[in-house]
Image (spheres, rainbow, N blue to C red):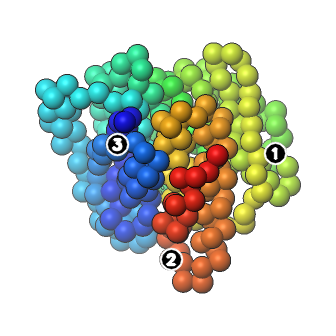
């Protein structure tokens, strides 16, 4: 069985980061090892959330795992929290990466042209350093703009996306994928660039007009789980895009759905059979 290490916060209430990654990657058949970077009462879209940083625990936990000779097939980072924690992730990757380990970085820090409340431009620069050592990165256009210094655009054409991908690729990652890319009216999806062969690949599905928190984490966790099931990255992204869109659709049709996250619990059984 593949073993995935995922490193993100625990937002106790809110359906994002580890409360999505753990069930999704486990359901897709990989052992999921978690390293919580912080414990928050809720995600940061609620008012008055509490947050306890857990950075001090990271080195002792790593040392214990080293002593146990643990290895990982994938190291997947999401929402981290502080610049110091990004530095620790670089060290963790240096320590645990072997030639077969996939390093998958989702540089979670913003959306819709804006940084999330906890972050600033120094944080964005540090995230670019982490992306430089990844095999696969999956920023959205906001995060891509922050890391490349390009302007964030609400409306754009394919050449804007290609240029951002090339600039992201220059940071150093193997495969750079932009999420939330809309190349046609009524569609949305992903476009990626593989540095190894210089190829761009894209996938577009129907846009579902609902914006929910945690959907980026659902997308990334699904990609990781599918790659671990043996799918090539573009197929993993296609399944993840379709699954995320379907989950948003199901959530919107549930009149009792909570505002803060998606009903992935209702759709998880379908994901297991998706091709
Ligand atoms: O879904 C991304 C995310 C993860 N964790 C926390 C967040 C967010 C987005 O706002 O606040 C704590």
Horizontal side of residue 203 vs 273, given as left or right: right
Per the model, the C-alpha gap separating discs 2 and 1 is 30 Å
Query: Can see residue 74?
Result: yes
Q: Which residue is more in the foreground, 208 or 123? A: 208
Per the model, the C-alpha gap separating discs 2 and 3 is 29 Å
Residue at image point 57% right, 38% down: 138
Residue tagged by mark 3?
31
User: What numbered label is drawn on residue 107?
Assistant: none
Q: Is mark 1 within 8 Å of ligand 1?
A: no
163 to 181, vertically: above or below? above
Residue tagged by mark 1?
183
Residue at image point 48% right, 66% down: 265
Q: How many marks?
A: 3
227 to 209, vertically: above or below? above
Q: Disc 2 vs disc 3: which is toward the camera?
A: 3
Residue tagged by mark 2?
258
Badge 2 marks a residue whose secondary structure is loop
Q: From the top left corner, tell me how far across and down residue 125 is, in percent.
A: 48, 33
Question: Which is more N-terminal, label 3 or label 2?
Answer: 3
Q: Is mark 3 within 8 Å of ligand 1?
A: no
């Amino acid at each position: 069985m593949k073993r995935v290490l995922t490193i993100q916060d625990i937002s106790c209430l809110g359906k994002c980061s580890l409360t999505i990654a753990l069930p999704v990657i486990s359901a897709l058949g990989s052992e999921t090892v978690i390293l919580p970077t912080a414990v928050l009462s809720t995600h940061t879209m609620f008012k008055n959330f509490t947050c306890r940083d857990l950075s001090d625990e990271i080195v002792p936990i790593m040392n214990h795992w080293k002593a146990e000779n643990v290895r990982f097939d994938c190291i997947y980072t999401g929402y981290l929290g502080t610049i110091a924690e990004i530095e620790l992730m670089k060290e963790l990757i240096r320590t645990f990466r072997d030639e077969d380990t996939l390093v998958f970085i989702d540089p979670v820090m913003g959306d819709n042209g804006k940084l999330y409340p906890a972050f600033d431009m120094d944080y964005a620069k540090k995230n670019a350093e982490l992306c430089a050592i990844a095999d696969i990165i999956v920023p959205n256009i906001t995060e891509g703009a922050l890391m490349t210094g390009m302007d964030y655009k609400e409306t754009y054409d394919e050449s804007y996306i290609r240029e951002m991908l090339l600039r992201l690729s220059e940071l150093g990652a193997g495969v750079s994928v932009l999420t939330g890319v809309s190349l046609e009216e009524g569609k949305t999806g992903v476009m990626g660039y593989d540095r190894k062969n210089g190829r761009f690949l894209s996938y577009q599905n129907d846009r579902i007009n609902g914006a929910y928190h945690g959907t980026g984490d659902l997308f990334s966790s699904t990609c990781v789980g599918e790659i671990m099931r043996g799918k090539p990255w573009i197929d993993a992204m296609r399944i993840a895009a379709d699954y995320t869109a379907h989950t948003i659709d199901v959530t919107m049709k549930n009149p009792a759905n909570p505002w803060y996250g998606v009903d992935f619990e209702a759709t998880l059984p379908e994901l297991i059979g998706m091709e």
